[in-house]
């Protein structure tokens, strides 16, 4: 399979290595200094760039009739536009805050626990996420996805980085060293606490999941999620 890498930073380089190990060919390594030459020859594009570049990357891929796997976060105010363009071009799209197989299992556990805990008003949910100091957005897209998973399965209505109201989930976002990503969901009461936690040890899991998603998406049309890729629906 021919892959275009839209974004060639630390994650892009890990994705490149894993893709090559799995027998794929890299036809474009897009950064801020080069063009989209070679994009149209790709079977699929993998976008791990920055929020300011994501929309241009995704748009150029769809206009070149190339399906997209996007792991960039912080640009989702334009998500509906990209969905409309994907449908217009009859292409295929997977956008996820986190492609790690472990994190997507973690998402499922989070939703299941939220359904159970919604019956018990004595517990208050809070979240914490820790990432490396180079991460541009806060809270992380993964933390937002976790918060949405709780909100959709409970009486909570919003998340906030500030002091939370009774119907809001407080997210504490920390930026420390070179931490790949740690996410914790806490349910606290007067008598005890329940903690659900995922710790990434390196970037390998994110990269492998993105390549697996690209392998799954190639040749398809439509809007999908990692639930489809991992058959979790």
Image (cartoon, helix red, strand yellow):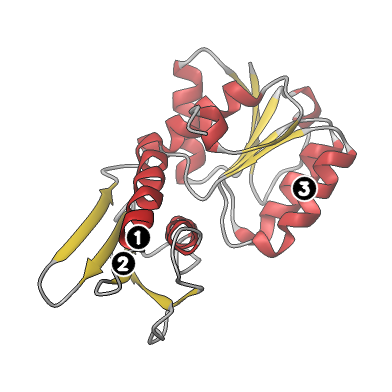
Q: Which badge, 1 or 3, comes first in the chain's sequence?
A: 3
Residue indicated by mark 2: 128
**Quick one: 61 or 183, which is closer to the camera?**
183
Label 1 to label 2: alpha-carbon separation: 14 Å
Q: Which badge, 3 or 2, comes first in the chain's sequence?
A: 3
Residue at x 47% of width, y 42% of height: 11
Report the side of 70 relative to 109 (left or right).
Answer: right
Q: Quadrant of residue 207?
A: top left
Query: Which class describes the residues within 10 Å of circle 1: few (<14), some (14-19), or many (20+)?
Result: some
Where's residue 55, x and y in %?
A: 73, 54
**Quick one: 155 or 131, which is closer to the camera?**
155
Residue at x 43% of width, y 60% of height: 150
Q: Quadrant of residue 25?
A: top right
Q: Do the CB atoms of the residues marked 1 and 2 lie less than 8 Å apart?
A: no
Label 3 to label 2: alpha-carbon separation: 30 Å
Where's residue 151, x and y in %?
A: 48, 64
Q: Quadrant of residue 176?
A: bottom left
Residue 179 can be seen, yes or no: yes
Q: Secondary structure at mark 2?
A: strand
Where's residue 65, x and y in %?
A: 83, 30
Residue at x 25% of width, y 65% of height: 186
Report the side of 143 relative to 35 (left or right).
Answer: left
Query: Which class describes the residues within 10 Å of circle 2: few (<14), some (14-19), or many (20+)?
Result: some
Query: Which class describes the residues within 10 Å of circle 3: few (<14), some (14-19), or many (20+)?
Result: some
Q: Secondary structure at mark 1?
A: loop
Q: Nearer the viewer, mark 1 or mark 2?
A: 2
Residue indicated by mark 1: 132
The tag on residue 83 is 3
Q: As displayed, is residue 53 above or below residue 218?
A: below
Label 1 to label 3: alpha-carbon separation: 30 Å
Where's residue 126, x and y in %?
A: 31, 71
């Amino acid at each position: 399979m021919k892959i275009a890498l839209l974004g060639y930073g630390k994650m892009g380089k890990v994705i490149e290595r894993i893709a090559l190990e799995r027998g794929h060919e890299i036809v474009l390594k897009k950064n801020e200094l080069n063009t989209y030459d070679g994009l149209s020859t790709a079977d699929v594009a993998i976008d791990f760039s920055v929020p300011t570049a994501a929309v241009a990357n995704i748009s150029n891929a769809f206009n070149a009739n190339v399906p997209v796997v996007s792991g960039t976060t912080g640009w989702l105010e334009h998500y509906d536009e990209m969905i409309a363009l994907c449908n217009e071009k009859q292409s295929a799209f997977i956008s996820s805050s986190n492609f790690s197989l472990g994190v997507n299992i973690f998402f499922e556990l989070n939703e299941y626990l939220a359904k159970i805990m919604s019956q018990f008003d004595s517990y208050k949910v809070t979240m914490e996420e820790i990432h490396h100091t180079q991460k541009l957005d806060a809270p992380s897209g993964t933390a937002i996805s976790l918060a949405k998973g709780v909100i959709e399965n409970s009486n909570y209505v919003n998340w906030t980085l500030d002091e939370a109201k009774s119907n809001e989930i407080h997210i504490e976002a920390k930026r420390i060293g070179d931490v790949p990503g740690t996410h914790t969901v806490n349910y606290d009461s007067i008598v005890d606490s329940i903690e659900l936690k995922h710790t990434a040890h390196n970037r390998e899991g994110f990269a492998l999941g993105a390549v697996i998603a690209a392998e799954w998406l190639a040749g398809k049309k439509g809007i999908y999620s990692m639930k489809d890729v991992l058959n979790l629906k």
